[in-house]
Amino acid sequence: MCSSDLVLSRYQASNCLTARNEVGPSTGKCEWQTGSCSQSRTTGRLASLAVRALIEEAELTPKPALADARGGGTQEDLSVSLLKRSARCLAPFFELIELISLEQIPTQTLREELGTIGWWAEHSWLQCTGQVSIHGGANWVFGLLVSAAAMGAASAEAIAETARQLACLPDRKASQKKIHGLWATRSHRPTGARAE
C-alpha cells in the first residue's frame, strides 16, 4: 500500500545524494532542509483537502458515462471504490508536495522536485489500482494547487496564479515515455493540461 514514511524516506535519501554531490564528501549525516519529521507530521491539511475533493468527486452520482455509484460508465475497469483507493494513495505525495513547498517561491528546482514526486505518485497509484490509470490529471493539477497554497498564496486567485507559474516552468527531467495525453496533444494539436 502507500506509506508516507516510505515516500518521505525516499525523498530524504534523494536529497541527501544530491546534497553530497553538490557539496563534496558526506559528513555521515543529512538533515531535511525543510524541517524535521515532527514538522512533517503537522503538515497535511492541504493534502487532506485534495484527497477529500477527489473522494467526493468519486462519490458524486449521477455522472453520465463516468464511474459513479451506478457503475464504471464507459470505462468498465473503473469503480467508485477504485477511484477512492487511488485518491487515498495520492495522500502521502500531496503531503510531501505540501512540505517541500512551505514558504517557497515558484522556481525551476521546485518545479522539477514536484515533477519527480508526481512520477513517484503515478507509479504508486498504478500499483494501488492494478495498473488502471485514474488520476493523472488530478495528480498534476492538485499537486500544483497544493504546492501553491503551501507557498502561502492566500486567495483562490493567488493560488491559481502561483500554480500557473509553476506549470509554465519546464521540467527538464520529465519522462519522454508515451502517455495518452501527450500522444493526443501531438496527434490532434490540443493545448493539453501543460499549456492550460
Image (spheres, grey):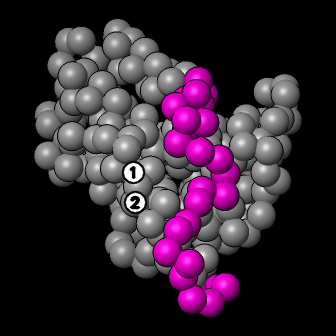
Q: Cα distance, mark 2 to mark 1?
A: 5 Å
Amino acid at pointer 2 = Arg
- Name the disc covering residue 59, or none: none
The reply to whether the C-beta atoms of the residues labelled 2 and 1 are less than 8 Å apart is yes
Task: Name the residue that disc number 2 marks.
Answer: 10
Taking the spot 51% from the left edge, 24% from the top edge, the residue there is 48
From this view, report whether residue 144 is shown above or below residue 115: above
Task: Name the residue that disc number 1 marks.
Answer: 7
Residue 23 % position (x, y):
67, 85
Residue 112 % position (x, y):
61, 67
Q: Nearer the viewer, residue 24 or 17?
A: 24
**Residue 143 is inside the magenta segment:** no
The span picked out in magenta is 21-46
For residue 117, say whether it is visible: yes
Taking the spot 46% from the left edge, 44% from the top edge, the residue there is 93
Mark 2 Cα-neighbour bin, 10 Å: few <14, some 14–19, many ≥20: few
Residue 123 % position (x, y):
30, 56
Secondary structure under the numbered disc 2 in the rendered image: helix
From this view, report whether residue 91 is shown above or below residue 54: below
Left/right of residue 158 with respect to residue 99 in the rendered view: right
Secondary structure under the numbered disc 1 in the rendered image: helix
Left/right of residue 10 with respect to residue 152 in the rendered view: left
Amino acid at pointer 1 = Val
From this view, report whether residue 179 is shown above or below residue 65: below
Q: Nearer the viewer, residue 26 or 123?
A: 26
From this view, report whether residue 52 is shown above or below residue 87: above
